[in-house]
């Protein structure tokens, strides 16, 4: 009996190491096979490069890439500003691109001062230009939101619970008083936001006074205008292409010739227009009820210095400023009222007149057709990079471009 037990103990002691040995052998064999595969693949990678192993660069290739290609710094976002949210501010901008641009700067500053959440502004679609563009069609909306996160919270849309209230008409809509001090918004608008949770400002043009505002508010307006409001990649790239085409032929002057039909109808400045054109401009002025001034004496307005230069006067002015007749002149404007008849004098004095439509192929601008604000954005970018910028009217674009160039 004792002999049998001894034999069993020997069998057990022999079988245990045997099973462990098998496991070890399997592991070792697998490791050798895997290592062989890695070596072979690395060799192939060095021979054939990225055509075979696009995601497996060799060690030498990786080292070369690290030496020759500088790594792009990761974008550092500003920290979020934490504050008690007093409600939500919705805004509908009105006017052309640069009027809306200035208004967006004002609305961001107001939202920051009132400690409310701003909803990405709605752009004008009902004015003379009838541009259907949304905010994100013109501006880089992600950059707009993230670059200002240390000042104010901005959302693309209202939270769902509040959106339903707005859809049911349960919101407060009003136009703020023009040229108001920031104290007006604190004393009049903030209580409404706290009461209704959401307030919609349906007019934004010149609703915040330019001067005598707190310094930090003024700084924020500039930051929004010159850093946060960045155009979309598509617009930026096309703008760079126009600038390259111009630079190939030397220095260039950007002429913001504000002589489109809407400008003349709004201002009532009809110098050089024939009777039919004067009548057409007057009809247009009466067709827009939000243009408050209807009866305008064009001669008196001109004597007060409130009219844009005509194309003929512009030619005289550029010659008086001794602008080289061979200078490239990029006309940053929409369709000039009166067409070739009114542009004849300027074209005779400066034959190198160009526009985005003459520099680019029609296919380049097909996505911009009937989108006047996107077209204006292209002109804005070119104006910023010009050697000389000449506006013929002291309007929104003239002021914003001058500030941006400074």
Image (tube, grey):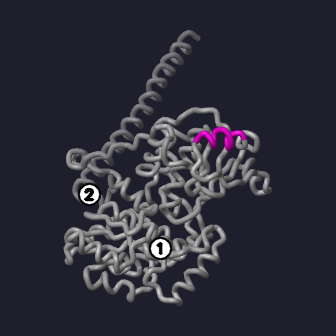
Q: In this view, does 380 lie to the left or right of 61?
A: right
State the residue in front, 292 or 396. 292
Position above or below: 49 against 129: above
Instruction: Residue 291 in the image: state x and y as whole percent.
Output: 61, 69
State the residue in front, 303 or 158. 303
Q: Name the residue under label 2.
A: 49
How many badges with numbers are in the image? 2
Position above or below: 281 against 37: below
Q: Can residue 334 be seen in this view?
A: yes
Residue in the picture at 44% in, 24% down: 17
Residue in the picture at 57% in, 46% down: 154
Question: Which stretch did the figure color magenta?
Answer: 182-191
Judged by depth in the image, the label closer to the viewer, 1 or 2, is 1
Q: Mark 1 points at which residue?
A: 368
- Label number found at residue 385: none
Where, by quadrant of the figure, is residue 186 drawn? top right
Considering the numbered disc 2 on the image, is that residue within a helix, a strand or a loop? helix
Residue in the picture at 57% in, 85% down: 279
Instruction: Residue 137 in the image: state x and y as whole percent.
Output: 52, 64
- Given the current orientation, which residue lies at the most extreme top position? 2
Question: For residue 185: magenta?
Answer: yes
Question: For residue 227: magenta?
Answer: no
For marks 1 and 2, the one nearer the N-term is: 2
Dominant secondary structure (helix, strand or loop) of the stretch shown in magenta:
helix
Where, by quadrant of the figure, is residue 311 drawn? bottom left
Residue in the picture at 58% in, 70% down: 132
User: For the residues marked 1 and 2, what is the alpha-carbon distance in whole angstroms?
Assistant: 42 Å
Instruction: Residue 352 in the image: state x and y as whole percent.
Output: 25, 80
Instruction: Residue 157 in the image: state x and y as whole percent.
Output: 64, 52
């Amino acid at each position: 009996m004792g002999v049998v037990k001894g034999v069993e103990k020997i069998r057990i002691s022999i079988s245990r190491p045997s099973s462990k040995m098998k496991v070890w052998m399997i592991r070792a064999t697998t490791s050798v096979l895997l290592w062989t595969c890695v070596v072979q693949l690395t060799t192939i990678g060095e021979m054939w490069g990225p055509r075979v192993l696009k995601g497996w660069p060799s060690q030498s290739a990786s080292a070369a890439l690290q030496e020759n290609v500088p790594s792009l710094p990761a974008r550092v976002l500003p920290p979020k500003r934490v504050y008690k949210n007093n409600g939500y501010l919705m805004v509908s901008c009105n006017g052309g691109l640069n009027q809306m641009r200035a208004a967006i700067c004002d609305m961001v500053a107001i939202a920051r001062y009132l400690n409310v959440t701003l909803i990405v502004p709605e752009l004008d679609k009902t004015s003379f230009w009838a541009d259907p563009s949304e905010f994100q069609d013109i501006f880089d909306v992600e950059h707009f939101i993230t670059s200002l996160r240390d000042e104010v919270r901005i959302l693309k849309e209202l939270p769902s619970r509040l959106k339903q209230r707005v859809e049911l008409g349960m919101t407060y809509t009003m136009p703020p008083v023009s040229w108001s001090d920031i104290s007006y918004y604190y004393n009049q608008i903030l209580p409404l936001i706290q009461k209704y949770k959401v307030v919609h400002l349906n007019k934004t043009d010149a609703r915040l006074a330019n001067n005598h505002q707190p310094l930090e508010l003024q700084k924020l307006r500039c930051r929004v205008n010159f850093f946060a409001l960045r155009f979309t990649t598509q617009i930026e790239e096309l703008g760079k292409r126009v600038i390259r085409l111009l630079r190939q032929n030397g220095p260039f002057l950007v002429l913001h010739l504000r002589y489109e039909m809407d400008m003349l109808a709004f201002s009532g400045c009809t110098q050089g227009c024939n009777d039919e054109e004067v009548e057409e401009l007057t009809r247009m002025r009466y067709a827009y009820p939000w243009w408050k001034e209807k009866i305008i004496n064009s001669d008196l307005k001109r004597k007060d210095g409130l009219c844009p230069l005509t194309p003929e006067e512009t030619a005289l002015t550029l010659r008086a400023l001794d602008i080289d007749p061979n200078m490239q002149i990029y006309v940053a404007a929409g369709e000039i009222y009166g067409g070739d008849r009114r542009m004849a004098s300027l074209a005779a004095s400066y034959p190198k007149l160009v526009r985005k439509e003459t520099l680019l192929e029609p296919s380049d601008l097909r996505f911009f057709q009937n989108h006047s604000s996107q077209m204006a954005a292209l002109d804005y970018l070119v104006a910023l990079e010009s050697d000389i910028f000449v506006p013929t009217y002291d309007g929104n674009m003239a002021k914003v471009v001058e500030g941006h160039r400074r």
